[in-house]
Amino acid sequence: MPAILVVFVIALALVTCSSRADQALEPSQIDSTRRIILAGGALFSRSQRNKQIASPDSLQTQGPASVSDVSTLSINPRGWARSFVDRAKDQVWVSDFPGFDATGANDSSPAFTAAVASCPASGCTIRVPTVSAKIKMGATVILKPGITLEGAAQAPGYKAATVLQRVQSSGPIFLLPGTASLSPGASTGIRITGLALDGGNVNLPVVSAPEVNPGRGTWNVEIDHVSFYNARPGISAINAWDWWVHDNAFIACGSNPATATSLSASSCLYIGNSTQSNYAGANSNSWRITDNFIDTSIGRGIVSDSTLGKYPNNFMSIKGNHFGVRGYESIFGCLRDSSILGNLSEGSIAGYPIFDLKSGSGCGFNTIIGNHLAAPGAFAIVDNGASDLVASNSFNIKGSATAWIQLGASSGNVSVMNNKADDSPCCNTIPMVSDLGSLNTVMWNDGSDGMVINGHLPFKKFGQSYLIPTDLSHLRPKQSAVSQLPTCNASTQGHIRVVYDANAPTYNATVVGGGLVWTTVLCNSVNWTAH
């Protein structure tokens, strides 16, 4: 290749001046494997089948305008040699295509569309360079199966360096294809990673995966290390299967549910079931939504909309997410056979619960375990499903809550176990459960109002029914100072407590604190009286 100039920077040490005669390599510079090593340790060549194969430290084309053919030149990035042509087949830079404007002055979506078109059917990686300006996206880019769209932020904690900003008034920035032409379970294999996507506060998704008749959505998608801004919503997918959404940030997303133009527009992440009701599996299925930061100060966090068709969204794993800044519901909608595990929420505004699990055909059989929820605007958890397990959740900062968990009128066979409220006076003076449903089981919770056994088991179930233990030998009313007794009114009438600082208590008279006497007290709907 005459136009290729091999530059050996360290090799200059072999010549001390331009007038010195050519010198032979000293024997010590050829090692036992017949590799030729220049002064300073730079590898010149290696021996293979009685031939010396050049292995230069740097390679330079001859001049910036070189058009030499390097298609047969091989490189070895992963342990096997591949030609430049082969490499170009599966990795392209969007900046190499006409229309890319790194200054942000003009629409760069034509370059993205051209890059997608250049990828073979087997797929490729489209790389987005790091630029300081926001890249304008004036038209929707339709991705296709096998594509990875990759920006600079690829590792946990890295901030996306390149921002793509929607400037068109309609359509998403990226549209993911449905799989109408593929059999159920077929893979589209699309990944978006390492970018920041600015939705421009338009009531349309930033990344959209609509359903394609006859009722197929987009399968096998991974979205990670992406920052969504001003998005209503950031992601919208209908009848979509096998998605993994992880390590993303949703900032200033969604909109006020009371004024939102749609359920989708109220959310940061919207998942819809199928509009088709004539076949099983017409829903979104098998999602993993993990380790995201979701800001709910403007709109809802995750919305599972099962109102579009017959079957609810199911097999969802919502785990380890941080719902930050008090706002609207962190999780809203109907789920089935799903798990909500180990999430953290900073709370919700007045009138809105943190988790609001709706009723509907098939909704239920979920596990809500190990979440830490603070400062609810109504309840920490509202569960209208069937046969759910609500266990080992922790609550603090009372907010506007009148109870931590509400089992709605549509709930049934829900088990509420081992949940705990903060021990401070703010949090353990309201009931753990408000039960409006039927056949629900409430047991082994701590911090709820009413009698407890061994300090943990609620004796009184707030709502329709009571949990009566078979063994009363360890019955012990909850203990506190007189000042820490909950308000005595119609809702606490009949509650029994033990106080340890009564001052000269008189039977059936209102108890007064400030003393040293232990006594049992009873709420008569007006006052706590000594007994």
Image (spheres, rainbow, N blue to C red):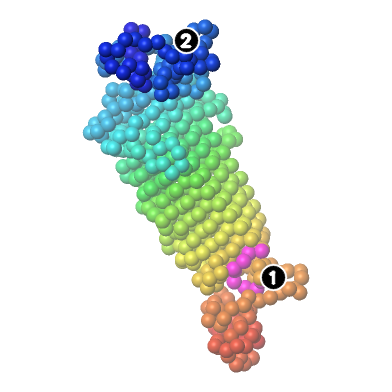
Q: Quadrant of residue 505?
A: bottom right
Q: In the image, 107: left or right of 456?
A: left
Name the quarter where the N terminus is drawn: top left
Q: What element carries label 2?
A: strand
Q: Note whether 118 is above or below 438 in the view shown.
A: above
Name the quarter where the C terminus is drawn: bottom right
Say which label, 2 or 1, has the lower sequence index.
2
Q: Is most of the magenta stretch helix, strand or loop?
A: loop
Q: Note whether 53 is above or below 445 in the view shown.
A: above
Residue highlighted by disc 2: 52
Query: What residue is rendered at 62% in x and 66% in y?
Result: 446
- Distance Cα–Cα, label 2 vs label 1: 82 Å
Give residue 260's position: percent from left, percent from top.
37, 49
Single out the residue that lies furthest toward the left. 105
Q: Does residue 20 appear in this view?
A: yes
Q: Give the range drawn in magenta.
A: 444-453
Q: Quadrant of residue 44?
A: top left
Q: Is mark 1 on a helix, strand or loop?
A: loop
Query: For this rendering, which residue is in front, 3 or 332?
Result: 3
> What crowding class fits label 1: few (fewer than 14 Cα within 10 Å), some (14-19), or many (20 or more)?
some
Residue 454 bears which disc, if any?
1
Membership of 451 in magenta stretch: yes
> Disc 2 residue type?
Gln
Membership of 127 in magenta stretch: no
Give residue 48's position: percent from left, percent from top.
52, 10
Query: What residue is rendered at 54% in x and 88% in y?
Result: 514
